[in-house]
Image (spheres, helix red, strand yellow):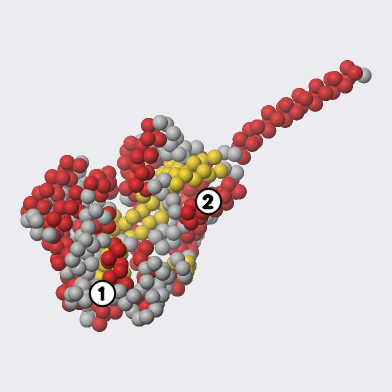
């Protein structure tokens, strides 16, 4: 009897051991984890990303570890992790890094291309895919973006019979008619080289006239007749702006205060124009700083043209999901597809005012995500759906800007050079010195050419 009891106990122990060992892989599967580095590090945006990650985990059993990384440090963090063989699975990052990371072997471009294909290449705007085309692949998966805007007083343009500012000539004419300093300025140009904003505005103006930093052969093309026209026009803009170091803050304040006819700004101005932010009151249109009057009086242009480039150009900023070469590829792909499909409305809502959809819909419903985005609420202290503030035509024009916009160098594989021009500020400083009269246009063009060649 005792022998039978011992045998029985041994069997129980063996069964328990097998069950324990067999249970381990199941728990490991349930605890499968991917790491996502994100530059959306503000607390509210981190909370929104965690909510999406939690939904994904509930659906798939795959955990997502979110790691906030300051955008200015993302390049050096990724390079160090790559050297150590310790990259995250996914990186949410701006356009500026995508091509150079693909070229360095940090991104799994084939995995990204598979995601785009499964979601449907035709459901994306082609412009955002073209920006990161790499050796026949998509270097990363576009998530959201925005097109830079020429914001103008549509009411004043119409009152004076002026054409919308879609060309250098139309902008020049409107500025000449409406400029009345010191009370009212035709435009507020960007003149502070220490601010990235100046490079964004200048690059936009240059692209409008067909200027890129390199040609198809990779030769630097800064000292050209087209760039000469750009410098002459930019000097005109500066001459019809207030004095001093001007960047995004002054341009927005002056526009809100009814003291300028035109500024170049990102869509992050849209909820402020509608009086939804106490920190940026609308001060020039009556006693109520929360009025939405200015939103209704404003017009928006995403693409304008210089004399040497009649088709014009826009300036865009796009963010991407990059799948790294160290990733759990299948799990990373699943998370992107979830974020760009079932949870895409929530993905855009992380910062709806500046996260415009780059995937417009599905094959079955081609405008599904456009409609969803337009109905998202924007604002700070007060919130309203974007579609209740701006017309369908205005919303459509902003999305068109993502399709037609571009950036220096990226479509020719020299996006890294643009990043260097931004980080060194050398072009912005040369432009400022030229508009201040410190150097002739010929000397400026030569130095722009030489400095760009040096950074190449």
The quarter of the displayed image where residue 150 is located: bottom left
Instruction: State the residue in front, 8 or 129.
Output: 8
* Location of mark 2 (residue): 50
Q: Tag 1, which secondary structure?
A: loop
Query: Viewed as shown, does residue 356 lie left or right of 445?
Result: right
Q: Is residue 204 visible?
A: no
Is the residue marked by circle 2 packed among few (<14), some (14-19), or many (20+) residues within 10 Å? some
Q: Tag 2, which secondary structure?
A: helix
Instruction: State the residue in front, 398 or 276.
Output: 276
Instruction: State the residue in front, 214 or 367.
Output: 214
Query: Viewed as shown, does residue 158 lie left or right of 172?
Result: right
Is the residue marked by circle 1 packed among few (<14), some (14-19), or many (20+) residues within 10 Å? many
Proximity of marks 2 and 1: CB atoms separated by less than 8 Å:
no
* Location of mark 1 (residue): 259
Q: How far apart are marks 2 and 1 (CA)?
A: 42 Å
Say if 293 sits above or below 373 in the image: below
Residue 111 position in % (x across, y down): 44, 41
Query: Viewed as shown, does residue 404 lie left or right of 334?
Result: left
Instruction: State the residue in front, 50 or 98.
Output: 50
């Amino acid at each position: 009897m005792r022998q039978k009891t011992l045998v029985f106990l041994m069997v129980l122990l063996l069964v328990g051991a097998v069950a324990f060992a067999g249970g381990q892989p199941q728990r490991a599967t349930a605890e499968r984890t991917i790491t996502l580095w994100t530059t959306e590090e503000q607390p509210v945006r981190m909370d929104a990303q965690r909510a999406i990650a939690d939904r994904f985990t509930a659906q798939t059993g795959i955990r997502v570890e979110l790691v906030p990384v300051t955008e200015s440090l993302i390049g050096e963090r990724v390079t160090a992790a790559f050297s150590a063989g310790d990259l995250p699975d996914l990186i949410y990052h701006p356009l500026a890094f995508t091509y150079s990371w693909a070229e360095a072997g940090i991104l799994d471009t084939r995995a990204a291309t598979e995601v785009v294909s499964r979601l449907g290449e035709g459901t994306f705007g082609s412009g955002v895919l073209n920006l990161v085309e790499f050796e026949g692949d998509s270097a990363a998966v576009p998530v959201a973006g925005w097109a830079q805007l020429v914001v103008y007083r549509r009411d004043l343009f119409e009152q004076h019979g002026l054409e919308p500012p879609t060309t250098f000539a139309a902008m020049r004419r409107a500025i000449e008619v409406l400029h009345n300093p010191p009370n009212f300025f035709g435009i507020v140009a960007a003149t502070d080289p220490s601010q990235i904003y100046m490079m964004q505005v200048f690059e936009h103006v240059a692209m409008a006239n067909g200027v890129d930093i390199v040609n198809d052969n990779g030769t630097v093309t800064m000292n050209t007749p087209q760039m000469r026209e750009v410098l002459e026009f930019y000097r005109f803009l500066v001459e019809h702006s207030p004095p001093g170091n001007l960047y995004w803050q002054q341009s927005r304040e002056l526009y809100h205060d009814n003291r300028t006819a035109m500024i170049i700004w990102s869509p992050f101005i849209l909820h402020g124009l509608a009086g939804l932010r106490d920190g940026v009151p609308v001060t020039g249109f009556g006693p109520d700083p929360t009025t939405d009057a200015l939103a209704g009086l404003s017009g928006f242009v995403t693409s304008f043209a210089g004399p040497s480039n009649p088709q014009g150009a826009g300036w865009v900023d796009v963010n991407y999901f990059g799948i790294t070469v160290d990733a759990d590829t299948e799990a990373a792909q699943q998370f992107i597809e979830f974020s760009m499909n079932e949870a895409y409305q929530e993905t855009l809502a992380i910062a709806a005012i500046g996260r415009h959809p780059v995937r417009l819909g599905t094959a079955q419903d081609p405008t599904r995500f456009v409609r969803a985005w337009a109905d998202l609420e924007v604002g700070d202290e007060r919130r309203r759906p974007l579609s209740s503030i701006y017309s369908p035509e205005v919303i459509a024009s902003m999305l068109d800007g993502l399709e037609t916009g571009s950036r220096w160098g990226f479509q020719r594989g020299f996006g890294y050079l643009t990043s260097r021009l931004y980080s060194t500020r050398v072009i912005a400083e040369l432009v400022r010195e030229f508009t201040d009269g410190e150097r002739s246009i010929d000397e400026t063009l030569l130095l722009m050419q030489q400095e760009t060649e040096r950074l190449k």
